[in-house]
């Protein structure tokens, strides 16, 4: 078993994605190379990357650049750093890494406001389709999650976990696999935004009103009402103002990833 693992690491050390880097924006290039390594070598969650020393040598980069790139990829669940084990492929949804356009958007210097708008467009469309296409099973799943949201609205950590599940359950009910994957890209950002909004509104009461409204609209197959509630829930009020206040100069994505890392620590 160990010999197979070492053989796998040796194969990765010879990968063309680990050639020396000479570009000025070094951290971005390191991120690109590590993404390419994961995707092209078909690495799975738990697979080890070469050691830090080996990566520094193969890429001809400094330790700080490598660690910054790994920190960014860890923040979105693509990598995990385990003491005593090194860097491994994370257990997040790394299938997003195979979508260069989406990944480029996620790591581009987009403003937080633009990302809120993008999320609003996506989730507003999804909730409308969920209202039109939902099955009885979908209603049962969304309803169960809503009950758990209600029961845990005073427990921020648990509430946020079910809040994420609520939005993903709506996406699944919409039956659009492409947009489900796009929504998955936003998951780690959503978690941070949900924490900020929870703190901003001093609890979950305002959010629960929106969640109940969405559920009732989906149950009634009222797509217009569902879209209106989702749009107001995402685009207006506490979320936008709170996120903007937590982001300097209407922020760029790289700064927001630092906020994600801070919230996770």
Image (cartoon, grey):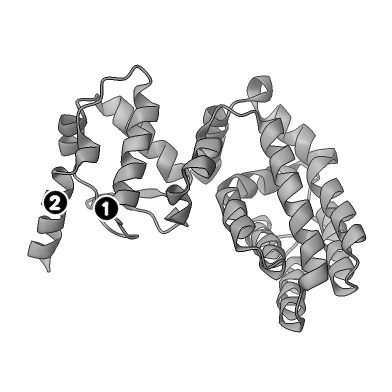
Quadrant of the image occupied by residue 109: top right
Above or below, comparing residue 105 to residue 139 in the picture: above
Residue with the most extreme top position: 24
Name the residue at 74% across, 80% down. 140
Name the residue at 54% across, 43% down. 102
Left or right: 79, with 135 as reference point: left
State the quadrant of the N terminus: bottom left
State the image coordinates of residue 82 (x, y, percent, origin top left).
Answer: 30, 51
Q: Which residue is mark 2?
A: 11
Q: Which residue is mark 1?
A: 41
Q: Residues within 10 Å of mark 2 (few under 14, many from 20)?
A: few
The answer to whether residue 110 of the structure is visible from this angle is: yes
Q: Are the two marked residues, 1 and 2, in contact with CB atoms closer than 8 angstroms?
A: yes
Among numbered discs 1 and 2, the one appearing first in the sequence? 2
Left or right: 66, with 11 as reference point: right
Give the distance between the C-alpha atoms of the residues marked 1 and 2, in whole angstroms: 10 Å
The circle drawn on residue 208 is none
The answer to whether residue 198 of the structure is visible from this angle is: no
Above or below, comparing residue 63 to residue 166 in the picture: above
Total number of numbered labels? 2
């Amino acid at each position: 078993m160990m010999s197979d693992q070492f053989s796998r690491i040796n194969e990765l050390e010879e990968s063309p994605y680990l050639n020396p880097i000479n570009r000025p924006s070094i951290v971005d290039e390191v991120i690109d190379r590590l993404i390419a390594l994961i995707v092209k070598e078909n690495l799975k969650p738990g697979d080890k990357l070469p050691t830090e020393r080996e990566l520094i040598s193969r890429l001809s980069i400094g330790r700080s650049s490598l660690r910054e790139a790994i920190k960014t990829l860890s923040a979105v669940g693509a990598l995990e750093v385990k003491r005593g084990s090194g860097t491994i492929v994370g257990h997040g949804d790394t299938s997003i890494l195979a979508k260069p356009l989406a990944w480029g958007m996620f790591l581009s210097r987009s403003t937080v406001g633009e990302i809120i708008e993008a999320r609003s467009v996506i989730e507003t469309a999804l909730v409308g389709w969920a209202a039109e296409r939902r099955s009885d099973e979908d209603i049962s799943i969304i309803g169960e999650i809503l009950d758990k949201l209600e029961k845990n609205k005073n427990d921020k950590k648990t509430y946020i976990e079910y809040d994420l599940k609520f939005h993903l359950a709506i996406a699944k009910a919409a039956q659009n696999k492409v947009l489900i994957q796009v929504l998955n890209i936003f998951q780690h950002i959503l978690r941070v935004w949900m924490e900020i909004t929870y703190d901003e509104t001093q609890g979950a009461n305002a959010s629960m009103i929106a969640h109940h409204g969405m559920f009732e609209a989906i149950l009634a197959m009222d797509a217009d009402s569902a879209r209106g509630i989702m749009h107001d829930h995402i685009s207006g009020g506490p979320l936008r103002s709170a996120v903007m206040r937590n982001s300097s100069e209407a922020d760029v994505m790289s700064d927001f990833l630092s906020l994600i890392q801070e919230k996770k620590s």
